[in-house]
Each structure stands twice: as C-alpha cells, then as structure tokens.
C-alpha cells in the first residue's frame, strides 16, 4: 500500500510539473502573439501615415527586404516636429522635400537607390546627412518675422538648418514683400496660411485643404 501511495504521489507531482510547464509555454505564446499584434498595428499605422507619399518612398519602407537597408533615418517629414498652426507653412515651403528619404551617409543613399531600382519601386530622393553643409547662424527674430529653424524642432539639427535656416514666418504677404525688398538677408518668406515668397520673387499661394482631401494626404 505504501508503494502504491508513493507512485500516486509521484504521478501527481509529474502532472503538476507538466501543467506548470504548459501554463508557462501558453504565457510565452500569449506574449509573442501580443508582440506580433503590436508590430502589425505599428506597421499598419506607419502605412496609413505614409499614404501621402509617392510610390517609391512607400515601397522603400513597406516592402520585405527594405529593413535590411543600412543607415536609413526616415523621411524629412518624419524628422520634423512642427508646432500646431505651422503645418500649412512648412508644407508649402518644403513641398516634395518632405518626402525625401534621409540617410546617414552617401554610401547608404547608393545602396537604397540600388534597392529601389532592383525592386522597380518608383522614384525617390535620398539625402545623406554627411553631405549637408555646415549650419550657418539663423537670423535674429523680430516683430516682423520669426525664423522657422527656431520654431520647428527635430532630432537632426543639421537637417533642420539646411531646410529651414533661411525660412521666415510672417503674418501676411505684404509683410513678406516688405522684408524681401529690403537689402540684407536672402530668405524665403511664408505666411502661416501657406503663401510663399522665394528669394527670386517667385510667389506660391492658394488654399490646398480641398485638394489634399480629394487627391492627397497631409505629410505633417
């Protein structure tokens, strides 16, 4: 009888060990499933956020194998922290440059371009950070103009200065023209509603909200 009780107890312990192992394995599977679900949701969110990009740029971030590209930092739009109320101005002044793919070095740009060509992924512009010119001093703000490089944030100061270092935010187009006609700083001036006056005198304007809703998506 004692031997039978020992065997029963041993079998019970084995079942408990097996049950604990099964519960641990199930918990591990649940964690993996949750991680994969989170990754899928993140990819779907990124895909939605990139709906406004050209096909070549979207393909570089979405297709299998693109993750093997070294040195890809993100798009220009990914790397700009634009305050509320400045989105229209920044989109107007940068335009297609918001879709440029930023990489660390020139060799990374070559590799990314080669991938795009092999995959037939469409056009894309690659911007190596190492080739950007040294940042020059941003002009002082005044009651007439605030400089975009001080208002817009981002993790890559060199990129920020390259794109926005000579972009002035003004309240209206008349003010932009007054500043443009003065001798001194050569700059691009933009209103918060998106009217742009370039150093050469080229004017760009018009509300893009209706166009964006029907044809495009905001990148910021």
Image (cartoon, rainbow, N blue to C red):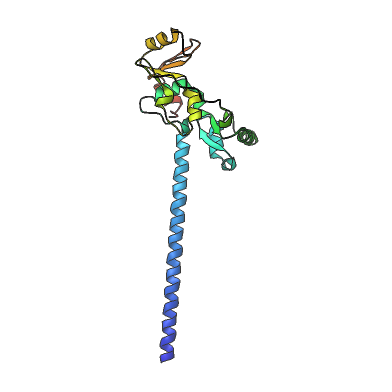
Number of numbered discs: 0
- Tell me if residue 11 can be seen: yes
| x and y, in percent, of residue 64 in the image | 57, 43
- Residue extending farthest to the left is 143
Residue at 46% x, 8% y: name it: 183
- Tell me if residue 124 can be seen: no
Q: Is residue 110 left or right of residue 42?
A: right
Q: Nearer the viewer, residue 140 or 199?
A: 140
| x and y, in percent, of residue 137 in the image | 47, 22
Vertical comparison of 76 with 36: above or below = above
| x and y, in percent, of residue 51 in the image | 47, 32
Vertical comparison of 100 with 180: above or below = below
Q: Can you say which quadrant of the picture contains the N terminus?
A: bottom left
- Residue extending farthest to the bottom is 1
| x and y, in percent, of residue 211 in the image | 43, 22
Residue at 44% x, 81% y: name it: 10
Q: Can you say which quadrant of the picture contains the C terminus?
A: top left
Vertical comparison of 187 with 35: above or below = above
Residue at 42% x, 84% y: name it: 8
């Amino acid at each position: 009888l004692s031997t039978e009780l020992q065997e029963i107890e041993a079998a019970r312990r084995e079942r408990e060990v097996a049950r604990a192992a099964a519960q641990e394995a199930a918990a591990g599977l649940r964690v993996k499933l949750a991680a994969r679900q989170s990754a899928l949701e993140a990819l779907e969110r990124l895909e939605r956020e990139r709906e406004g990009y050209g096909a070549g740029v979207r393909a570089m971030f979405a297709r299998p194998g693109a993750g093997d590209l070294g040195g890809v930092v993100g798009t220009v739009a990914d790397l700009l922290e634009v305050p509320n109320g400045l989105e229209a101005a920044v989109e107007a002044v940068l335009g297609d440059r918001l879709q440029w793919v930023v990489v660390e070095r020139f060799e990374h740009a070559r590799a990314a371009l080669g991938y795009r060509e092999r995959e037939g992924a469409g056009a894309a512009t690659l911007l190596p950070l190492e080739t950007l010119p040294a940042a020059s001093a941003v002009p002082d703000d005044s009651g007439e103009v605030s400089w975009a490089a001080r208002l817009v944030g981002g993790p890559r100061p060199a990129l920020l200065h390259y794109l926005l270092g000579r972009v002035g935010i003004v309240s209206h187009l008349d003010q932009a023209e007054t500043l443009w006609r003065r001798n001194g700083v050569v700059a691009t001036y933009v209103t918060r509603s998106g009217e742009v006056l370039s150093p050469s005198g080229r004017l760009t304007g018009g509300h893009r909200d209706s166009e964006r809703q029907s044809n495009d998506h905001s990148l910021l």
